[in-house]
Amino acid sequence: MGRERNRTWKHLYFCIACMILISLAGCATLKEMEAKRETRKYLITAQKLVDQGDYEGSLKENQKVLSLYDNASPGDEALFNAGLIYAHPGYPKRDYQKSLDHFKRLVKVFPQSPFAGQAKIWIGILQENERLKREIEELNKTINKSKQVDIEIDEKKKELSK
């Protein structure tokens, strides 16, 4: 008889312990769900702000997401959005290097992200753009040197014709 009562209490303690664990896990899951919902609001707001031309506001909303999920999803989406903003032709503070940095970080930190493929495309486009920009600058320097040589030749001709 003594054993029956001990088993009953053990089962009761075990059930209570299980209920405590389940409730704690449930609270953690609820908090996580709330954080994800809040993050989704930030991302939706960020997209609306871009559509309205408020690039700075959108960057701030994406930064909020990154502060919560720097190395976890949906941080990948926030990085992608920020990369797009920095490359956006309507953004007065457009910065292709910052855009490239965001896309590279996305590919490095989130290689399995659904945004990684698009980020790789943007990386290629931005790097090609930078390469062409450097080539144009070199060609302009060559043209300027050529013009200077032409001016010097004209001056020499004028001196010789006198």
Image (tube, grey):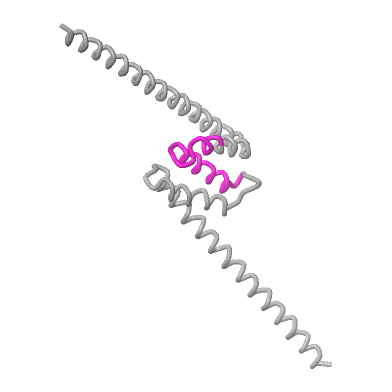
Q: Is residue 51 above or below residue 31?
A: below
User: Residue 59 at x, y = what percent?
Assistant: 58, 39
Choose between 129 and 106: the one closer to the eye: 106
Label the magenta part by its dominant secondary structure.
helix
Choose between 110 and 45: the one closer to the eye: 110
- In the picture as drawn, the residue positioned furthest to the front comes out as 2
Instruction: Locate the C terminus and report the quarter of the image it occupies.
Output: bottom right
Q: Name the image quarter holding residue 48.
A: top right
- In the picture as drawn, the residue positioned furthest to the top comes out as 1
Q: Is residue 9 magenta?
A: no
User: Residue 93 at x, y = what percent?
Assistant: 65, 47
Q: Which residues are magenta?
A: 64-90
Q: Name the image quarter holding residue 135.
A: bottom right
On the picture, is 157 further left or further right than 1? right
Choose between 52 and 58: the one closer to the eye: 58
Q: Is residue 67 above or below residue 119?
A: above
Q: Residue at x 79, y 93 (%)?
A: 160
Q: Residue at x 78, y 85 (%)?
A: 155
Q: Is residue 126 above or below residue 23?
A: below
User: Residue 25 at x, y = what percent?
Assistant: 37, 23
User: Residue 19 at x, y = what percent?
Assistant: 32, 16
Q: Residue at x 51, y 41 (%)?
A: 81
Instruction: Locate the N terminus and report the quarter of the image it occupies.
Output: top left
- In the picture as drawn, the residue positioned furthest to the right comes out as 162
Q: Is residue 85 magenta?
A: yes
